[in-house]
Amino acid sequence: MAKHSLDKDKIKILLLEGVHQSAVDVLERAGYTNIEYHKASLGEEALIASIKDAHFVGLRSRTQLSETVLSQADKLVGIGCFCIGTNQVNLKVAEKLGIPVFNAPFSNTRSVAELVLGEIIMLLRGIPQRNAMAHRGGWLKSASGSFEARGKTLGVIGYGHIGTQLGILAETLGMRVIFFDIEDKLPLGNAQQIHSMQELIALADVVSLHVPETPQTKEMIGEAELAYMKKGSILINASRGTVVDIDALASVLEADKIAGAAIDVFPVEPKSNDDEFISPLRGLDNVILTPHVGGSTQEAQENIGIEVAGKLAKYSDNGSTMTAVNFPEVSLAQHKDTSRLLHIHHNQPGVLIQINQAFAEKGINIAAQYLQTTNEIGYVVMEVDSDQAEEALEQMKTIDGTIRTRLLHSH
Ligand SMILES: NC(=O)C1=CN([C@@H]2O[C@H](COP(=O)(O)OP(=O)(O)OC[C@H]3O[C@@H](n4cnc5c(N)ncnc54)[C@H](O)[C@@H]3O)[C@@H](O)[C@H]2O)C=CC1
Ligand SMILES: O=C(O)CCC(=O)C(=O)O
């Protein structure tokens, strides 16, 4: 039996932002009991203190894993984003440090699409204004500015998992769906790809944003794009707060240029439910403001917990990095009767030869070997006889270009 690099109960897992209990259950079932659980995100100072001795961290969208934080996370071997977006993590720095980042690419897709669909109906009917007036004792019983969704055009920007799902749901209401994406995409149902964002915006009664946060999507909806929107149309943003110039949006709403908006994500979001939400959109009756809850349903959170915790446990147990967003992907079955060694290195010529040579010189028998690379790093997984595992680990550590090594638990 191989010696373990670290007993499972010594592997500290830091879970932040109230990730679902399902995550804790999966980790505990896999033998990981050293879990530090926080209901909220941590500010930088507290985060650095907690992450210092953590081997894995799980977070949602609020926690910022910046270069400063990551560079002080000396023991960190894996990161789990219990959500879709991974922009809160400095992925490049994590990659250079040899830390894979996992997420849940689909588990809350349906929740976001359903919320947006509901908002489309509410906004087309002018319900937010009527609701706000009724709360103040008013009575706006009028069909003026109130429309059915049937026959209206939905313009989806970013036709990925959420955009396509929304398109299908919207078609069931009788909406016409058009979309803009930087990639050529297979249109689902009767949807039609439009190759100019400006053209799409000018055609749509409802514009809904479903792009990731990237340098290209930063304020992609600004003053000029808002000016292309049809009079009386609607803007929905449940993607990332940086995608819309929020001051420009407030101006067109105040000027009644567009009929309303539903905004779930903001350039600056409160760090916790106790902090004040500050936005130029506050007080506008024709705007649905939600506190970044597009993916916050019981179903989504439970599924995300299972999915991401499962990926972390699998990486810890097996070295499998399938679906990691910043790392060479290696799919590995459970190893039996041998020990598995992980070697993460700068992607430079000759690393594998050096490892093989070092092992040959020491008479270490290689039972299996896998290699994948990105431009930046290489990831080698080796299986060796268990009684040679410690020696093999020492050899791996001496290889030029090594970022980190691990000896995995045997099964
Ligand atoms: N409000 C919430 O709670 C949630 C928000 N999100 C956000 O929604 C985003 C989208 O999620 P998914 O649909 O799952 O992602 P996805 O990756 O499946 O789809 C994104 C699509 O945007 C396209 N795209 C990228 N850059 C573009 C650009 N500059 N112009 C036009 N299209 C562009 C991509 O080609 C892709 O088709 C996530 O990145 C996340 O930030 C996701 C889940 C929950
Ligand atoms: O659930 C969260 O905290 C964030 C959801 C989200 O925005 C995402 O999945 O990208």
Image: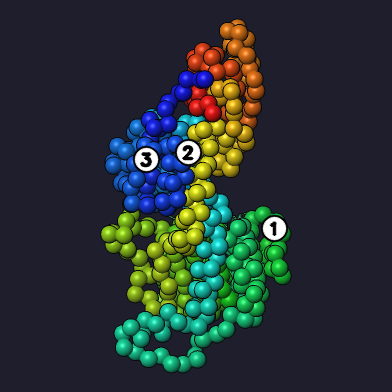
Q: Earlier in the sequence, mark 2 or mark 1?
A: 2
Q: Which of the two discs, 3 and 1, sits closer to the camera?
A: 3
Q: Which of the two discs, 2 and 1, sits closer to the camera?
A: 2
Residue type at mark 2 is Ala
Left or right? Give the position of 370 relative to 86. Answer: right
Considering depth in this image, is 118 or 251 the residue closer to the camera?
118
Q: Which of the two discs, 3 and 2, sits closer to the camera?
A: 2
**Residue annotated with mark 2:** 30
Q: CA distance from mark 3 to mark 2?
A: 12 Å
Residue labelled 3 has its Cβ within 8 Å of some atom of ligand 2: no
Residue type at mark 3 is Ile
Q: Position of residue 329 (x, y in %)?
A: 61, 36
Q: Position of residue 48 (x, y in %)?
A: 32, 38
Residue labelled 2 has its Cβ within 8 Å of some atom of ligand 2: no
**Residue annotated with mark 3:** 35
Reply above or below: 344 against 220.
above
Name the residue rendered at 50%, 49% in the picture.
306
Name the residue rendered at 50%, 73% in the picture.
119
Rendering quarter of residue 106:
bottom right
Using the rendered image of the protein, determine whether residue 198 is visible from the camera's viewpoint: no
Q: How packed is label 3: few (under 14 Cα within 10 Å), some, or many (20 or more)? A: some
**Residue annotated with mark 1:** 185
Name the residue rendered at 62%, 60% in the picture.
159
Mark 3 falls on what kind of element? strand
Considering depth in this image, is 366 or 50 the residue closer to the camera?
366
Q: CA distance from mark 2 to mark 1?
A: 39 Å
Rendering quarter of residue 411:
top right
